[in-house]
Image: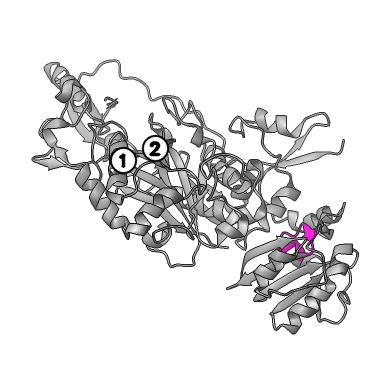
Amino acid sequence: MRSAAPLPEGFIAVVKQDCPTCRLVAPAFIELVAAGVPLTVFSQDDALFPPGLPVADDTSLEMSFRLGIEVVPTLLRVAGGEVVARTEGWRREEWRRLTAVPALAQALPEYRPGCGSRTLDPGIEERLAAGAAAELRARRIVLGDREDGIDACFERGWTDGLPVVPPTPERVLRMLQGTRRKPEEVIARVPPDFAPCTVEKAAINAVLAGCRPEYLPVVLAAVEAVCRDEFNIHGVLATTYFVGPVVIVNGPIVRAIGLNSGVNALGQGNRANATIGRALQLVIRNVGGGRPGEIDRATLGNPGKYTFCFAEDEERSPWEPLHVERGLPRGSSAVTVFAGEGPRAVFDQLSRSPESLARSYAWCLRSVAHPKLVRDYDAVVVVSPEHGRVFREAGWSKARLRGEIAELLSVPSTELVRGAAGCAEGMPAGFAAGTVTKFQPDGLLFAHAGGTAGLFSAIIGGWKNGPAGSQPVTTEVRP
Amino acid sequence: MREQILLDPTSERQPQTRPRAPRPRSLAGKVVGLLDISKPRGDVFLDRLAALLAERGVRVERFRKPTFTKVAPLELRSEIGAKCDAVVEALAD
């Protein structure tokens, strides 16, 4: 099923003759081929449909299952062996945009919903699953006749407090179609129990979290990233401090799976954002054994510990993407994990110069952890489009902004020591001579996200940085 | 209702309960390890304990974890186990 054969480059369309929409749009395929678009059509039920074209026979549904097809027609763009974009049903503008054939299908309507993929027909999934289920190694738990699947998951302690999707073998198999990696591959040892996490275990937790199969590679990358020694998920989990893993996603995968980097990017409402961050936390809970009140000793925690994942808006960003700045090639997909607390607001509706806006950032950043504590705590600044524009128009690089903020936050060390300014909290006496600044040189990350209206940015404060605490980790998302 | 099967999302490990090592009846002739986990002011507490133990003629060995945020390295745990009859781990702030 997880055929190693590479996907054909260019475009793949999956259709079935039994679908009225597929029959209606059949002329579009002929047009695309005539326009020189590299297109491979897979037919689920009739190797002679659509007529007039070479058609790849997928009556076995192997390709449809591998591609996670739920609707026909589905058009997918494949680059470098990866699916980088897909559209379901007939959306003329979307097909024109994806294929770059602007006059495609003039005679066809703008929109027609598709039909269900044959992989979703009753019995088919089970038949496909039956052949593959033998590959799965996880313990099988048989529920009683009257047991509710969702309640059964609660009772076994597998949830974060919200209902989860019961991980049936069929769902797990479908989830595993989202990656080419083998189910038995160990991707990480997950603290606090340092238990091995296989692709299969991660997939089971991704099902619990509500992920779609195409999200799985991002979940796997996030698990790998937090389990690197530098990130120190053990400490992030065990600390009494607020933090949990914050996942920032970059690259073509963002658009391919529909992650939100726009309006309400740090909030609710997007399935990919919501479930990827949640799947990561469920892996830590279920595979690693990290549960609140046990090894997780957070005094207060933060709501982001349910899930905290968003994408960077690279197109509108005034700067290079976060993962590129952190050493990965442009065009790659990646996750960056940061041990962060909840976001806090930077309100500045009046600054039109970068100098003025940098002051607002600096003053708000001073309070990360405590205004009198310096050097130990990093932060992510999520710069919104309206604030980003100020820096872009002035030609300020990230390095310039970092430098300005460092300058603005430089104060005599005597003002920061314990007891200074009538406050017992602060740095130990004599911790530094002269003036000191708030952050380490690499202690400020910038990511660009948010809706186009609103002169606000967000600060996500960190936890103890450096080798003794947690360092951000960027990991490539692999198919 | 048809039979429903779920796949176990956990590591499938069974926690093992092991009895605690027997507590020494007296510290006479014993070696007591003092483990500083590198939290601020843990040394204040342990220095005081070391002084009190020394007054009673108890031999003390001092240890320090590289960071309080990670579990103690295996070598450190083995060293404490090999050198000491009892250990006090200080959590402070």
Type of residue at label 1? Ser
Q: Residue at x 41, y 36 (%)?
A: A345
Q: Residue at x 15, y 17 (%)?
A: B52
Q: Residue at x 48, y 25 (%)?
A: A293
Residue annotated with mark 1: A360
Chain assignment, label 2: A
Q: Give me the C-alpha separation between circle 2 and circle 1.
A: 8 Å
Instruction: Please give left or right for residue B25 compared with residue B49 in the image.
Output: right
Residue A146 visible in image: yes
Give the quarter of the image for residue A20. Answer: bottom right
Q: Is residue A65 magenta?
A: yes
Name the secondary structure under disc 2: strand
Work out whether A95 lies above or below A435.
below
Numbered circle sitting on residue A347: 2
Foreground: A244 or A131?
A244
Give the magenta range: A64-73
Question: On the rendered image, what quadrant is the C terminus of chain A found in?
Answer: bottom right
Position of residue A7 measured from the top left corner of the image (x, y, whole percent): 66, 73
Position of residue A373 measured from the top left corner of the image (x, y, whole percent): 24, 33
Position of residue A232 measured from the top left corner of the image (x, y, whole percent): 39, 44
